[in-house]
Image (spheres, rainbow, N blue to C red):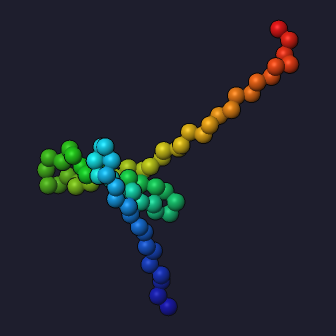
Amino acid sequence: MSEEKKKYGAWKKTTPKGEVINFTIEGQKYNMWVNTYKKADNQPDYQIYEDNYKKETESKSIVNDDLEF
């Protein structure tokens, strides 16, 4: 019996900051950007960052008009 290989997908899009490749591995999201700071061949062509962005939810403030002041 052979072990099933895992497959992952990636999506490329263009943003105002440049081209980015987004992908998820085992529930963790990542962004991969071209390394614009590359100065030598031994430096990576791409930089990978964990995507920890959390969309802000609309918070509702609690108002209690029954308080006496």
Can I make out residue 56 in this image? yes
The count of marks equals 0
Q: Which residue lies furthest to the left in this view?
A: 40
Q: Residue furthest bottom?
A: 1
Along the viewing direction, whichever of 35 and 64 lies nearer the viewer: 64
Locate residue 30, reporting x and y percent: 41, 54
Q: Seen in the image, is 22 located left or right of residue 41?
A: right
Q: Measuring 48% from the left and 46% from the top, which residue is drawn there?
A: 52
Q: Seen in the image, is 17 located left or right of residue 39?
A: right
Locate residue 40, reporting x and y percent: 13, 50
Q: Measuring 53% from the left and 43% from the top, which residue is drawn there?
A: 55
Can I make out residue 47 in this image? no
Q: Quadrant of residue 64?
A: top right
Along the viewing direction, whichever of 52 and 64 lies nearer the viewer: 64
Q: Is residue 15 above or below residue 3?
A: above
Locate residue 28, reporting x and y percent: 49, 56
Locate residue 43, reporting x and y percent: 20, 52
Q: Measuring 45% from the left and 74% from the top, which residue is drawn there?
A: 6
Q: Seen in the image, is 57 located left or right of residue 63?
A: left
Q: Is residue 55 above or below residue 21?
A: above
Q: Quadrant of residue 7?
A: bottom left
Q: Is residue 22 above or below residue 17?
A: below
- Give the position of the C terminus as an image quadrant: top right
Q: Measuring 44% from the left and 78% from the top, which residue is drawn there?
A: 5
